[in-house]
Image (cartoon, rainbow, N blue to C red):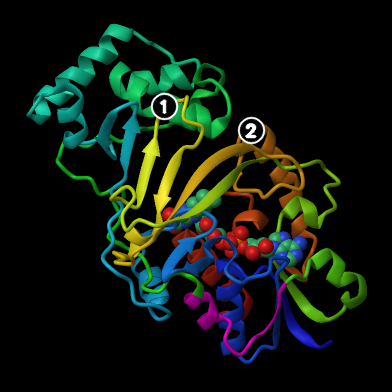
Amino acid sequence: MKYDYLIVGAGLFGSVFAYEANKRGKYCLVIDKRSHIGGNIYCESVDGINVHKYGAHIFHTSNKAVWQYINQFAEFNNYINSPVAIYKDELYNLPFNMNTFIKMWGIKTPAQAKAKIKEQIRELNIVEPSNLEEQALSLVGRDVYEKLVKGYTEKQWGRSCTKLPSFIIKRLPLRFTYDNNYFNDRYQGIPMGGYTPIIEKMLSGIEVRLNTDYFDYIKSEKDCAKKTVFTGMIDAFFGYNLGYLEYRSLRFEHERLDCDNYQGNAVVNYTEREVPYTRIIEHKHFEFGKQPSTVISKEYPSEWKPGDEPYYPVNDEKNNGLYDRYAKLAESQSDVIFGGRLGSYRYYDMDKVIDAALKAVALEFGN
Ligand code: FDA
């Protein structure tokens, strides 16, 4: 056999595994069906602006070991994610905090904000929420729900909040301080120069073949490696023989504009139902760019059908049950390691993917 490992997917999981295996003297081939490395964290440079082609990617973690690990491949800047929301002609700070409440109700103190929310929740008198709308209302009250949650959630899921199950929203964090930092994590930032150079460094010295689909490749190269690391869709690996796992998809409209500052912030959410996109990303602000032009991306949620780009797993009871059955099948494949967001059918932030890849490495190599 030519290779020790055939690694399917040049995304973060595949690249961390490849880097660690290569470091241990293992001979790896990385293939990806896309025309570039990086998977969904791929950035493309336009006028010197690193465009996050598959949606905004902000690195945040409380895992010190993962933070130290990723910092060997890049220097991170001090970007703090502080999105704003536009509802009709009103603009609010996110996440829901004192800046949001002062704008919404003209109140000044945390006690006043708490009382307002409590009063709205009490008036609704929802004892046991039977759908997402009732769940959200019973967590944040009518105003925050109507202006900042309802339309956005309905666009994301493509259906009315009254038709969505309540478990989708377990909590909606309310912050009674003037703090617009979206994340609570200890470490946060954007790699200076974007994410692609991180993957380039991880894959340096390793054979990579792009535009190469695993299912075509193994037709002629079935026995090319002792083991396979598979980060594609687990149901696809098994020929969908138990059925299709479902996803929500996204469509991005990227636009280069001849102005230096379109919206003054990297992330602006559009929370009313009537605006068809959920958010506009202005990429230069992730790296405090001073270029004379700018690039924006509008993000449109869409239904997923087999063949579309899978973005968000729909982790309801039906799909989780189906995934468990695929995971059982996977256990019988002793020469295949399944990993990453598609191989594990779960939404994984980047830090969790790195952690999972390092755990797979430890399991495989024992160190
Ligand atoms: P990824 O999908 O990146 O890589 C898998 C690779 O396998 C792909 O390149 C694919 O082409 C390839 N592949 C699949 N099937 C194949 C086949 N049959 N043959 C060959 N190749 C095949 N996280 C975070 O921490 N902060 C954030 O801000 C965000 N933001 C964000 C926005 C959006 C819109 C999404 C959908 C996700 C995020 N994330 C995130 C999550 C982040 O994108 C995620 O953690 C990593 O990209 C997952 O890396 P993987 O390697 O698991 O998958």
The residue under label 2 is which amino acid type? Glu
The circle drawn on residue 272 is 1
- The image shows residue 82, relative to residue 72, as above or below, that is above
The residue under label 1 is which amino acid type? Glu
- The image shows residue 211, relative to residue 79, as above or below, that is below
Asked if residue 367 shows in the view, the reply is no
For marks 1 and 2 on the same chain, the one whose residue lies earlier in the sequence: 1
Question: Residue 243, how many percent across, how many down?
Answer: 81, 41
Task: Tell me which residue sits at (54%, 80%) in the image.
Answer: 200
Considering every residue shown, the one lying at the far right of the view is: 220
Q: Can you identify the residue that label 2 sits on?
A: 317
Asked if residue 342 shows in the view, the reply is yes
Using the numbered discs, state the Cα–Cα distance from disc 1 to disc 2 in whole angstroms: 29 Å
Residues in magenta, as a range: 197-210
Question: Residue 260, how many percent across, how many down?
Answer: 32, 58
Question: Which class describes the residues within 10 Å of circle 1: few (<14), some (14-19), or many (20+)?
Answer: many
SS class, disc 2: helix
